Image (spheres, helix red, strand yellow):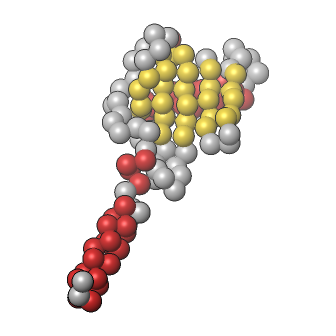
Amino acid sequence: MSSFMKVFLLLAVMVCMSKAQGPGQSDQCLCQRVRNGIGSKTDIKDIQIYPATIFCGKVEIVVTVNSGLRYCLNPKLRAVQKVMASIMKQKTSTTARPTETTSTSGTTNTARI
């Protein structure tokens, strides 16, 4: 094999490797699609918040409803921010009904309502 061909193959392999390790952070995100609305608040069973990481550069909010269906919410929506604020307020308030908050492996915050 000629040295020109070896150099060409080496460059091709390097390009493929750089594309595979590139900034495709959104490929590693849990939420590929988000809902732009919240269903019934009373139907929410569980909310999980995933902070931004090196694998996914955005905050993800995953909601589980009583039927077991899971979907992602858009954290930039005002309605979602209000729901999250009310959950956090319940967590810190002593007069509100108790909310159990758990954290798994330091990366996920879960609030059970």
Residue 109 x, y percent position in the rendering: 62, 35
Q: Of residues 80 and 105, which is closer to you in this image?
A: 105
Locate residue 79 relative to residue 87 in the image: left or right.
Answer: left
Seen in the picture, residue 42 relative to 47 is either above or below; the reply is above
Residue 45 x, y percent position in the rendering: 54, 16
- Residue sitting farthest toward the bottom: 3
Seen in the picture, residue 16 relative to 40 is either above or below; the reply is below
Residue 40 x, y percent position in the rendering: 43, 14
Name the residue located 42 percent from the left edge and 31 percent from the top edge.
72
Name the residue located 24 percent from the left edge and 83 percent from the top edge.
1
Which corner quadrant of the image does residue 2 belong to? bottom left
Q: Is residue 77 visible?
A: no
- Residue sitting farthest toward the right: 94
Seen in the picture, residue 11 relative to 108 is either above or below; the reply is below
Locate residue 101 relative to residue 2 in the image: left or right.
Answer: right
Which corner quadrant of the image does residue 94 belong to? top right
Locate residue 12 relative to residue 43 in the image: left or right.
Answer: left
